[in-house]
Image (tube, rainbow, N blue to C red):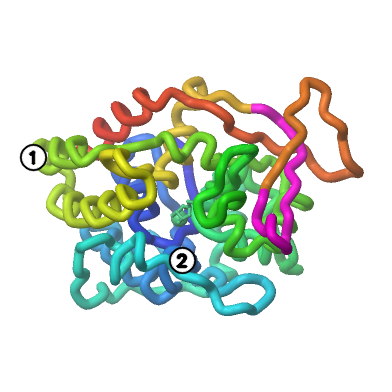
Amino acid sequence: MKKVLIIADPGVDDSFAIMYALLHPEIEVVGIVCDYGNVSQKDAIRNTKLLLKIADQEDIPIILGADRPLTGEAPQYFYDIHGDYGLGGFVPDSPASIKVYPFTKMYELIDEHGKDLTVVNLSRLSTLALMYFHPESNIDQVDQVLIMGGAFHVPGNVTPLAEANIYGDPQAAKVVAKHGQNITFIPLNVSNRAIITNDDISHLTQNSISPYSSILEPIMSYYSKQYENLIPGINGAPLHDVTLFSYLLNQDRYLTVDRQVQVIVDGPSKGLTHADFRPVPKVIGKAPIHTIVVDFDPSFFVKDFIEIMS
Ligand code: BDR
Ligand code: CA
């Protein structure tokens, strides 16, 4: 059983990732930290409550993460891609009355689960970066931290060079790259190819016995329509955030390299991530070496997603 603490901004692909984690028989979700990015923190909380309520798992603590970048600037949201409420075309009803815990609840959960815990970061890196600064921080006690973020020598999605989770708070990404231990980045190099088609979703709608089966289509169809405008002919959309859980459970299907990670924080390349992929990389200073996932088996990803969501 893998215990996970999720940091997320649901958002369509975050919502699918949360559903996948809650339905997976080998994953135990110990808490969900809501921050911002695709949507505001308020909407992220409402959507997380809804997902927990549908799965009848309202006992999982929801925790307040960061609501803006470290610089204090106003966040940029992406309702155009994720829909008016962040759930594609699905309109949520009034929020479930589930308690929301303060930031420090994360430290309690890390104390409780320590080395058994994986932190899965699906949003901007602001919350995670704050955890490295905080005097009570025990983030170094967890087994590993998985981050959906970066575009290593491939096009970005929010700018030609940058991926959204890094671009949204590059200072935070830099802190994490500089101070984080046992970090794995799962970048667009992989997640852009984690495409679930509309036919996959129709198949699930008709055959899934999960409590989510009736909301999959309205959530996905809006999101995939928006992706069709960005990548004509894609026939579906990448579920970036699901790749982290797929990786966690099936590491033999993913190819990784270990390198230092550099983040550009401003200028025209703001949010760019890069690493020295030469066979013998030049090591710069004392910055830690991180794992970067560079390739995977997309057909396995789709098959596994359909199986778990069924
Ligand atoms: C990442 O940014 C967010 O929009 C998605 O949910 C994902 O975490 C993809 O760049
Ligand atoms: Ca996300």
Residue 8 at x, y = what percent?
Answer: 46, 59
Q: Secondary structure at mark 1?
A: helix
Q: Position of residue 45 (x, y in %)?
A: 38, 70
Query: Which amino acid does the dot numbered 2 rest on?
Result: Cys
Q: Position of residue 197 (x, y in %)?
A: 25, 38
The residue lying at 29 percent from left, 70 percent from top is 85
Label 2 crowd bin: few (<14), some (14–19), many (20+), radius 10 Å: many
- Viewer-side residue, 191 vs 22: 191
The residue that label 1 is drawn on is 206
Q: Quadrant of the C terminus?
A: top left
Where 253 falls versus 165 (above or below)? Answer: above
**Magenta segment range?**
257-272
Q: Is residue 78 left or right of residue 251?
A: left
Look at label 1 and name its amino acid.
Answer: Gln
Give me the disc on residue 34. 2
Answer few, some or many: residues within 10 Å of disc 1's Cα (few below 14, many 20 plus, some between 14 and 19): few
Task: Decide whether the magenta segment is chiefly helix, strand or loop.
Answer: loop
Query: Mark 2: is the Cβ under 8 angstroms from ligand 2?
Result: no
